[in-house]
Amino acid sequence: MSVASSTSTTTSRALVAPGPLVFRRLRLPQGATPPASLGGRRVGAGAGALHAALLAPEGAVFDAWIGHAPAEERRHGCVRFATDGDWLHGIAEIDDRAIGLQPAAHRAYADLFEVVAANGCSNLLRFWNYLADINLEADGSERYRQFNAGRQQAFIEARHSAFEGAPAACALGLRDGALRVYFLAGRRPPLAIENPRQVSAYRYPDAYGPRSPTFSRAALVDVGGGRQALFISGTASIVGHTTVHVGDVRRQTEESLLNIAAVRQVAAERAGVEIPVGALVCTVYLRRAADLGVVRAVFERAVGATSPAARDCIYLQADICRTELLVEIEAHAFVPGGAVA
């Protein structure tokens, strides 16, 4: 097939409604194997789980992204991935100790960009980034800043937007382990959502590093089956570009939830449908395990103690991208609707 006809076929396919994408947050009994899926993230006990303590619930949880057709796992470079033709989930994993975090981040993103380009799912929707010692000063700069530099450079080289229109994302620090970049991509482009209460992350001043973080506050996308999905990036106690309520975990949690409410409001206007807070599927990251009781109480009061959001929320211990931040919340939700305008 010629390049021209291949491009035409890909473009035509992108206009066809995708098969439905499904998410399941599954509690795994001891020793259980996750079900067949495009892929996902395991937390708690078990092989392949993140090196982050699952503070609640007990046991193990698997966040599964499920397509409409069977998909076999494949490999390219440092990436393992699976696709059903409409959706692609993968993980780029690389030990940065030998080559340094900036080159490792660059390679992870370069490899995954090659994967999505070669498999017809070139629209990146969501990233989950995990790296050891995110706040550690090493080789003259903080490791999170090194990660940002490698990530942004890969975006630019692959001609993916590193600024306006960047995918939703989070970046958390773990106790140890390799750099892991989980990602979800599809045929339909997402609509980037920003928070009017915050400076866009890609426009942060130089005080936060020579390369700005590469993500939008949220992304809205048609996920087939007459539904839209809102992916909300990791959200913390930041107003403008400044951390607020330093040292006060209760108020930081409240401020994070206010930021999520602001993103939900903007997204609801673009989606044409309300996005109830109680319908969110949330992951809450805590810097200090001892803060679980306070954070959980604030969270459940905001979303409703008997809501699906409260019932399905998981709480992980992880370092946040700024040393003064004590909590971060990420979320997603499915709502009715067709193709996103």
Image (spheres, grey):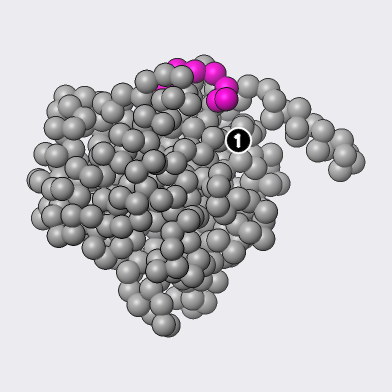
What amino acid is found at the position of numbered circle 1 in the picture? Pro
Q: Main secondary structure of the magenta part?
A: loop
Does 30 sit left or right of 23 as displayed? Answer: left
Query: Looking at the figure, which quarter contains the C terminus?
Result: top right
Q: Is residue 234 visible?
A: no
Q: Secondary structure at mark 1?
A: loop
Magenta stretch: give its range: 335-341
* Nearer to us in this view, 336 or 317: 336
Where does residue 139 sit, x and y in percent of width and height?
A: 42, 82
Which quarter of the picture shows residue 83? top right
Which quarter of the picture shows residue 330? top left
Q: Height in image: 295 above or below 336?
A: below
Query: Looking at the figure, which quarter contains the N terminus?
Result: top right
* Nearer to us in this view, 11 or 181: 11
Where does residue 312 sit, x and y in percent of width and height?
A: 26, 32
Where does residue 86 sit, x and y in percent of width and height?
A: 62, 31
Q: Which residue appears at 35% of the width and 66% of the height?
A: 134
Does 36 sit left or right of 173 as displayed? Answer: right
Does 20 sit left or right of 51 as displayed? Answer: right
Q: Residue furthest bottom?
A: 139
Where does residue 269 sit, x and y in percent of width and height?
A: 44, 24
Q: Which residue appears at 18% of the width and 38% of the height?
A: 299
